[in-house]
Image (cartoon, helix red, strand yellow):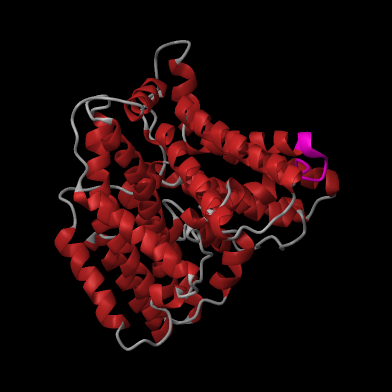
């Protein structure tokens, strides 16, 4: 159920109306039913799987709370095995079967399974560590597991962040509705007007690798770096906006990532809920940066390798993770050699240029169909075919993105995001919605991250 479809808008509007009218005791069951409907609209067959996983989390958490340290850890590991096993089966079974046997099971990936897996682990980890009491009522865990704004592609919301808000869910207020509409409409514009139109150019050039000259292929690579940022941040904006209208505040997922001056800063700005999840639940438990340079680099490589595998079952995602791991290690070694220095002037511009170029080039295998396709794209960038065509919209989107990052860098982020009681904000937001309706591309274009 895409966020811009009438079905979703009707579901959201109905939820808002009923939350406004119903007593507090009914709000959590209402959100749970809405989440189950949202999930069933995509594929009814997987609803039992969703319910079963949530009820298993409820039982395991109760068991952990009533057990000694050894049994508590065993139950937590059992929960990890359950969720990671489901993820591995649906996401990677066909990949591993296709290599030796040449056959596949043609499995359908349950909606948002990767994001649900990580969110569920935060609940089990919080109970296991004693940061949160296990919920006695299974409805609490079901409502957490089925919160529909974040279902398909995040942000990855931790149990400590979401469950207390669901417990005290208020009636939707005027400020929540306005702030929710603000974020939702900005995301709608980014998705339908910017990301999808960039995607048309990217699909044409990537789909005919080798036919286009180097300049056109470079433009397509830059266009994809913008497309995936605008597309995914649009989903995050719309999810945050829908949740805010319901009275729930979700964590931010993007913070102008192409303003980063090194790979480490990029990952503190890009898909932050995932970056911080890997940091807190994998990198730090592995030892983080406390055990020397060699161990730190090994931890970084392992984390980014797993991050790449999490994104998809293919060697291109492995390559993407390895490249980012090497970038993080190189920055770590450079920082130890040169020390921590603040960039300014020319050095700052050079650092920004290198970091942005590196992130953009890493997106090539991420977008490519396979390693052979990756090689053809890179070869074309070094001197490819004879067709020269760069759509003017690519330059316009690049200009808008640079301008937005510049405004943010000058400390005018509130103006850019229309925060605060600005008299012209409603007119601007309605204009964005109108532009999204008028200039949306033909056909259904799903969110890029929904397939992960």
Q: Which of the two residues, 231 or 130, is positioned nearer the viewer here?
A: 231
Residue interval drawn in magenta: 285-295
The x and y percentages for residue 448 are 36, 45
Q: Is 290 included in the stretch rendered in magenta?
A: yes
Name the residue located 22 percent from the left edge and 42 percent from the top edge.
Answer: 390
The x and y percentages for residue 285 are 75, 44
Using residue 348 as the reference point, say whether residue 433 is left or right of it. left
Q: Which of the two residues, 368 or 137, is positioned nearer the viewer here?
A: 368
Q: Is residue 302 above or below residue 160?
A: above
Q: Is residue 234 above or below residue 93?
A: below
Q: Main secondary structure of the magenta part?
A: loop
Q: Tell me the quarter of the picture where residue 230 sits.
A: bottom left
The x and y percentages for residue 223 are 32, 45
**Looking at the image, which residue sits at the far front?**
346
Q: How many marks?
A: 0
Q: Is residue 57 visible?
A: no
Q: Which of the two residues, 82 or 335, is positioned nearer the viewer here?
A: 335
Q: Which of the two residues, 357 or 426, is positioned nearer the viewer here?
A: 357
Name the residue located 25 percent from the left edge and 34 percent from the top edge.
Answer: 205
Q: Is residue 380 above or below residue 363?
A: above
Please identify the quadrant where the N terminus is shown.
bottom left
Name the residue located 50 percent from the left edge and 41 percent from the top edge.
Answer: 358
**Looking at the image, which residue sits at the far top?**
101
The x and y percentages for residue 217 are 30, 34
Please identify the quadrant where the C terminus is shown.
top left
Q: Is residue 70 visible?
A: yes
Name the residue located 77 percent from the left edge and 55 percent from the top edge.
Answer: 129
Q: Tell me the quarter of the picture where residue 187 sits.
A: bottom left
Q: Is 419 included in the stretch rendered in magenta?
A: no
């Amino acid at each position: 159920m895409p966020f811009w479809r009438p079905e979703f808008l009707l579901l959201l509007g109905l939820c808002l109306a009923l939350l406004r009218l119903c007593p507090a005791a009914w709000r959590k069951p209402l959100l749970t039913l809405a989440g189950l409907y949202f999930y069933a609209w995509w594929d009814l067959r997987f609803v039992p799987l969703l319910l079963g996983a949530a009820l298993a989390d409820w039982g395991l958490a109760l068991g952990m709370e009533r057990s000694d340290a050894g049994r508590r850890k065993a139950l937590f590991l059992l929960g990890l095995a359950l969720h990671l096993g489901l993820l591995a089966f649906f996401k990677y079974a066909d990949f591993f079967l296709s290599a030796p046997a040449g056959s596949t099971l043609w499995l359908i990936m349950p909606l948002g399974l990767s994001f649900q897996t990580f969110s569920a682990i935060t609940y089990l980890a919080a109970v296991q560590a004693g940061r949160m009491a296990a919920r006695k009522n299974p409805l609490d865990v079901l409502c957490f597991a089925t919160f529909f704004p974040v279902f398909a592609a995040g942000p990855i919301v931790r149990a400590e962040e979401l469950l207390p808000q669901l417990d005290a869910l208020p009636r939707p207020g005027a400020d929540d509705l306005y702030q929710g509409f603000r974020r939702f409409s900005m995301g709608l514009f980014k998705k339908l007007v910017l990301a999808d139109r960039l995607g048309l150019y990217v699909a044409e050039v990537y789909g005919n690798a080798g036919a286009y000259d180097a300049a056109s292929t470079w433009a397509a690579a830059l266009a994809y770096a913008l497309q995936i940022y605008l597309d995914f941040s649009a989903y995050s904006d719309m999810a945050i906006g829908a949740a805010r209208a319901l009275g729930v505040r979700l964590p931010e997922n993007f913070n102008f990532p192409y303003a980063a001056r090194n790979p480490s800063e990029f990952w503190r700005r890009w898909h932050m809920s995932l970056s911080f999840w890997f940091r807190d639940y994998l990198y730090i438990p592995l030892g983080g940066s406390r055990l020397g340079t060699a161990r730190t680099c090994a931890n970084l490589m392992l984390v980014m390798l797993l991050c790449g595998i999490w994104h998809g079952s293919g060697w291109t995602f492995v390559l993407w993770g390895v490249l980012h791991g090497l970038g993080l290690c190189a920055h770590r070694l450079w920082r130890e050699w040169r020390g921590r220095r603040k960039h300014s002037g020319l050095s700052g511009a050079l650092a920004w240029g290198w970091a942005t170029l590196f992130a953009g080039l890493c997106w090539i295998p991420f977008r490519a169909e396979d390693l052979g396709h990756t090689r053809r794209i890179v070869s074309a960038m070094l001197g490819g075919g004879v067709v020269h065509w760069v759509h003017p919209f690519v330059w316009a989107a690049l200009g808008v993105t640079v301008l937005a990052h510049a405004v943010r860098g000058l400390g005018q982020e509130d103006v850019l995001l229309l925060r605060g009681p600005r008299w012209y904000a409603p007119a601007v937001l309605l204009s964005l919605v109108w532009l999204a309706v008028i200039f949306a591309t033909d056909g259904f274009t799903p969110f890029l991250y929904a397939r992960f």
